[in-house]
Image (spheres, rainbow, N blue to C red):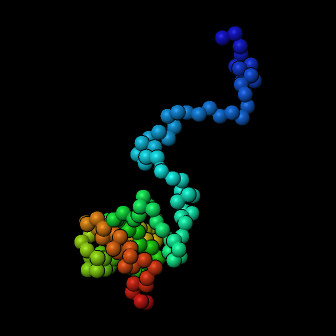
Amino acid sequence: MDKSLDEIIATRPKGIRRSNPRRNSGKAQVLGTPATAPATRARAVPASNGAKTVPAATAQQPADKIIVSNLPTDVNEQQVKELFHTTVGPLREVTLHYDSNGRSKGVAAVHFQRRGDGTKAFQQYNNRLIDGS
């Protein structure tokens, strides 16, 4: 070490970032590498009849949890449980989110016991007025 720290810093090239080979390796191991880029999948070529084609890799998998939003502030967990249990299926858990003052934020997480019930509830209630008031 016959150079001072200032000399080492001055001789180091500017603007070149060193890459870390370990960076994001855990994410790649968990998620895998996608076959195509998201932008490529988004530009799916429409079929001749005008319907969009969806690659098999992006097909919707059965879900067991949904997030319900835009709920009135007077709705409680019991009402959400009753609605989804009677119309969709058995529930594991319903969690209504509250602010620091204890008022409902109008968002609930509904966790179903059976896989696929979340998808069924989504198809049945997405963008629909439930109570009518």
Above or below, 83 against 10 in this view is: below
Residue extending farthest to the front is 48
- Count the marks: 0
Residue 20 location, quadrant: top right
**Residue occupying image coordinates x 48% and y 68%:** 53
- Which residue is rendered at x = 25% and y = 66% of the image? 113
Task: Report whether 2 appears left or right of 132.
Answer: right
Observer able to see residue 94: no
Residue 95, image quadrant = bottom left
Point out the residue furthest to the top here: 2
Residue beneath the point at 53% across and 64% down: 44
Q: Residue furthest bottom?
A: 133
Left or right: 44 as drawn, with respect to 121: right
117 displayed left or right of 18 = left
What is the x, y in percent for residue 24?
50, 41
Locate the C terminus by quadrant. Answer: bottom left
Location of residue 129 in the rendering, given as x and y in whole percent from the top left corner: 43, 84
Q: Quadrant of the N terminus?
A: top right
7 w.r.t. 40: above or below: above
Residue 36, how many percent across, how many down? 51, 53
Q: Please report the residue visible at 72 percent of the width from the left and 28 percent of the height from the top.
A: 13
Q: Position of residue 23 (x, y in %)?
A: 51, 37
| Residue 94 as seen in the image, left or right of residue 43 | left
Q: Is residue 115 visible in this depiction of the protein?
A: yes
Residue 61 vs residue 27, the one in the foreground: 61
Q: Nearer the viewer, residue 111 or 19?
A: 19
